[in-house]
Image (spheres, rainbow, N blue to C red):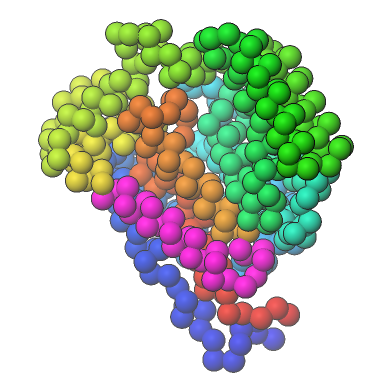
Amino acid sequence: MSIFRSGFSPWRNFDWRLFLTGLALSLFGLLTVAATHNPGHLKRQIISLLIALILFFLLTTLDFRKFRPIAEVLFGVAIFLLIVVLNMGHTAYGAQRWINLFGFTFQPSELVKPAMIFMLAKFFEQRQGKLDTILDILPGFILVGVPFFLIYKQPDLGSAIVLVVIFFLMAYWAGMKFSRLFMLTSPLLSILALYVLPFYPLLSWGIYLSLILAALYLMHFPLLDSAIYFGLNFFSGLFSSFFWNSLSLYQRNRILSFINPDIDPLARGLRYHTVKSVIAVGSGGFFGKGLFHGSLTNLQYIPQQHTDFIFSVIGEEFGFLGAGIVVLLLFYLLSRIYTAATQTTDDFGRYLSVGILGLLGFQVIINISMNIGLSPVVGLPLPFTSYGGTALIVSWVALGLVQSVAIHRQTIRL
């Protein structure tokens, strides 16, 4: 028996704007990777794009609901790979994030993102409208906590934070109130108040805890929830030095130099990446210096300019005009994903699309922000544009799943 209604064509709802926007960004990404003058990177990126497109069309033709029964299996495999990479992974740039297999290198932290989205989509489909207490959300938080800890240990703080953002966006979409979501994130603010702020930390922390108590009372939180939230804030602050010191030295330096630029006024150490990136973006002017003519790019003044700092290459060689077009394309792509989420009547498909929206959207915002000095430097690529085979393939896999949601939104269940 066909799963489609009579006369229904699976390609009738194909979102060409979604596909063509992703393709335009990927082709522009190839051009930008070529500008970094590394033929090996360009060749590998082209191969990765071809693989990504094959997977995209394969997933497009599949009914996304087929992944619901195997969500646990996919998540379990992803967790297993994260454990493997911590014990046997390849180390580079001070992090153990890669697995070498038959001559290919891939990042399990990228693979766990769609796997976790499957699990959370299934969880929130079953719990939507029933997320009033911390105990209701606790199983979902554990689902995120396990891969978060494993990725954090690599260390890869950027990818770990992505998982949390995906969780919060999906939880909000499932009906969890913003006040509850804020309380879940509040222990982080407790750590910042006591350990990171440069002025009167004990006083700041005391004031912050008083505000938390007042908020819990005024918003009529249940007594058990209030006790748990306040306890999380109190103990996270109490052990803030432990949490802070668990970060790698370079991660702590990135945060501190962002909060207080005077730590490195000449940008010769902690702020070197950010300042050089900002200079490169600004030096491009309106029209840019032209492809292969960016002086900072050609002389490779910016470390990781083909991955995390690809936007600096775009800004220098294509200027404000080129960078603006890339930003518009990225946000238009996100708007198409949002449209797919709102148009489907299937709850699993809706949460799947929202999770992918959080995955790609957060990476877009953070990558561009850190390239222009508006956020601390974290290891997040610019989707579809940065060099990196695993990240590119996962981005296209995510688009394939969104296309499947769009195409099969008029199908019926067996």
Q: Quadrant of residue 381?
A: top left
Q: Can residue 10 be seen in the rendering of this structure?
A: yes
Q: Position of residue 104 (x, y in %)?
A: 50, 38
Q: Which residues are magenta?
A: 325-350
Image vertical order of residue 311 relative to residue 278, above or below: below
Residue at image location 23% in from the left, 36% down from the top: 315
Q: Can residue 40 be seen in the rendering of this structure?
A: no
**In the displayed structure image, the side of residue 139 where residue 185 appears, left or right:** left
Q: Quadrant of the N terminus?
A: bottom right
Image vertical order of residue 122 relative to residue 299, above or below: below
- The residue nearer to you, when weighing 62 against 84, is 62
Q: Position of residue 372 (x, y in %)?
A: 32, 30
- The residue nearer to you, when weighing 179 against 369, is 179
Q: Position of residue 81 (x, y in %)?
A: 66, 37
Residue at image location 32% in from the left, 42% down from the top: 43
| 263 in the magenta segment | no
Q: Quadrant of the C terminus?
A: bottom right
